[in-house]
Image (cartoon, rainbow, N blue to C red):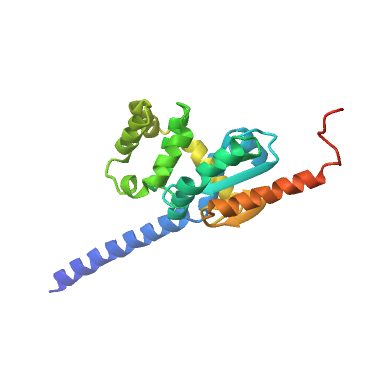
Amino acid sequence: MASSQSKFYGILGVILIAGAGLIAFVVIKNRNPDAIATTEYSSLTTSSSEMVSGEVGVARGQEDAPVLIEEYADYLCGACGMVATLTIPQVLRDYVDTGAARFIFYDYPLNPGSPAELAAQAARCAGDQNAFWAMHKVLMGRQREWGTARNVSRMFREYADALGLDGTAVEDCVESGVHDAVVQASGERARQLGLNQTPTFFINGQPVVGAMGYDRMAAMIEEELAKQQASQPSGEGDEDR
């Protein structure tokens, strides 16, 4: 009986010691998780201007356009998907491609390690074949399909093939993590700005949180264009007669 009790207390002691060690490890590991991220991405996140020039965001439109639209979004955000498929294509057509506005998209995966990070990479991999926006729209519109897929990279390959791209190259690009650092840096930029919800827009610096329909975004763009026009000296831009 005494021997059994000794054996029991001995095993209990080992369990307690192991448990204490595990707790200590977790506490130390998570004491300053931000320091790990800062160190890892320090070369990419020294300043906002450097991040933009370093193509952390994906831009479309003329650099000197009077209106700048910035979006921070997550590829598994339902509201982001709605905006990407219903609002942004019209904005690109009516304002960005006509020179009235410039659009910059920033990846902001809210859950590190989620398939959304891989989707962000897939869009950029398609961008290597000059098809970022086409892949972006497909991924945003088919979130439920690839978001629950067992082999998400294969789904990206199929989407790329359907777009007429080299799907195998896109799949290999995602699996190799070529664009992982820039996606992470884009997310770090959003965190530095204190953003905690997607989508978040900035229209000439004016923040708007949440989904935006085309009419609302167009109205804001028109308002900014009107401000720009009103600020110009009378007669500026008129041709000499």
Left or right of residue 237: residue 58 = left
Q: Residue at x 40, y 42 (%)?
A: 139
Where residue 30 appears, as percent x and y from the top left, is 47, 55
State whether residue 121 appears in this view: no
Q: Is residue 230 above or below residue 125?
A: below
Where residue 233 appears, as percent x and y from the top left, is 86, 41
Q: Residue furthest bottom?
A: 1
Q: Nearer the viewer, residue 196 or 222?
A: 222
Figure label count: 0
Q: Nearer the viewer, residue 28 or 55?
A: 55
Q: Quadrant of residue 118?
A: top left
Where residue 214 appears, as percent x and y from the top left, is 54, 50
Q: Residue at x 59, y 35 (%)?
A: 97
Quadrant location of the N terminus in the rendered image: bottom left
Q: Residue at x 65, y 35 (%)?
A: 99
Q: Is residue 175 above or below residue 13?
A: above
Left or right of residue 35: residue 119 = left
Quadrant location of the C terminus in the rendered image: top right
Where residue 59 appears, as percent x and y from the top left, is 58, 36
Q: Residue furthest left?
A: 1
State whether residue 145 appears in this view: yes
Q: Residue at x 44, y 47 (%)?
A: 75
Q: Nearer the viewer, residue 220 or 121?
A: 220
Q: Nearer the viewer, residue 40 or 197?
A: 197
